[in-house]
Image (cartoon, rainbow, N blue to C red):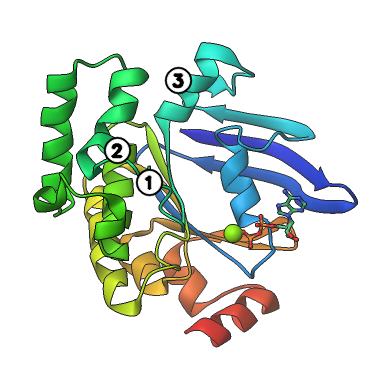
Amino acid sequence: MIRTQDVNKHFGELHVLKDITIDVPRGQVVVVAGPSGSGKSTLCRTINRLEPIDSGTIEVDGEPLPMEGKALAKLRADVGMVFQQFNLFAHKSIVDNVTLGPIKVRKKSKSAARDEAMELLTRVGIADQAEKFPAQLSGGQQQRAAIARALAMNPKVMMFDEPTSALDPEMVQEVLDVMASLANEGMTMFVITHEMGFARRAAHRVIFMDYGAVIEDTSPEEFFTNPRTERAQDFLSKIL
Ligand code: ADP
Ligand code: MG
């Protein structure tokens, strides 16, 4: 579903992605971990072309990333993104946040989009919040709304960039539970997180990045019990 080959990117002098070659098969859940500044968010953003790359190739579902226009809009709809900051539209109700993309990009009718939005909000457990504005919801509820909004586009893959790191601790689990159920349903997921409980429970694979490079790409079991690199060992000893 996602294939990157020798991807390199610089920010000025900083070599932020170094020969990144990864392959995420359909239905796989990949957890990406690594120290702050190691390039995780940049990698995530290259995959729907929020960040251009200097060299290498990226394919989503067998197609090279489109440069612009309608094809790029379609790519962005196919690759759902959930960020640390929920990025909901503050002046729209929760249900309107969810229906906006399907109506504008997927050309759904208002009533069909609304029915589907309500189903999704039910699925993430906040149907009763549908008519409220984002600021009236807790952080955990807002993040679940952001997940519903991404799902409403019927994405091929869901990317999560530290989706729980801005949340109060008591709200982390409700978001991880929604993510775990998505994983169970077979969604292809690329999840940057330091929630190693989630990695153990839901990931098929763990990628560990450091200084812009992938230095481990292995099963969760192997990663937790037998990390090969000293840097991964050191990282785990700090967060577990
Ligand atoms: P991570 O998500 O692993 O913490 P990032 O991908 O956000 O890492 O950042 C990797 C490196 O690139 C960091 O050193 C960061 O400061 C730098 N960086 C990220 N975005 C930009 C940017 N837009 N311009 C310049 N440097 C950036
Ligand atoms: Mg980041």
Q: Nearer the viewer, residue 225 or 100?
A: 100
For label 2, the crowd category at 10 Å Cα-Cα, with few meaning under 14, some 14 to 19 and many 20 or more, is many
Q: Which residue is mark 2?
A: 97
Q: Residue at x 57, y 46 (%)?
A: 44
Q: Residue at x 57, y 28 (%)?
A: 59
Q: Residue at x 62, y 31 (%)?
A: 58
Instruction: From the top left corner, tell me how far across and down residue 133 is, in percent.
Output: 25, 49
Q: Nearer the viewer, residue 11 or 209?
A: 11
- Circles 2 and 1 in contact, beta carbons < 8 Å: yes
Marks 3 and 1, the one that precedes in the sequence: 3
Amino acid of disc 2: Asn
Q: Which residue is mark 3?
A: 74
Q: Is mark 3 within 8 Å of ligand 1?
A: no
- Circles 3 and 1 in contact, beta carbons < 8 Å: no
Q: Is residue 183 left or right of residue 233?
A: left
Classify mark 2: helix, strand or loop: helix
Q: Is residue 92 left or right of residue 117?
A: right
Does 112 sit above or below residue 4? above
Marks 2 and 1, the one that precedes in the sequence: 1
Q: Is residue 172 left or right of residue 207?
A: left
* Residue furthest to the front: 91
For label 1, the crowd category at 10 Å Cα-Cα, with few meaning under 14, some 14 to 19 and many 20 or more, is some
Label 2 to label 1: alpha-carbon separation: 7 Å
Q: Which residue is mark 1?
A: 88
Q: Is residue 180 visible?
A: no
Assign the N terminus to one quadrant of the image: top left
Classify mark 3: helix, strand or loop: helix
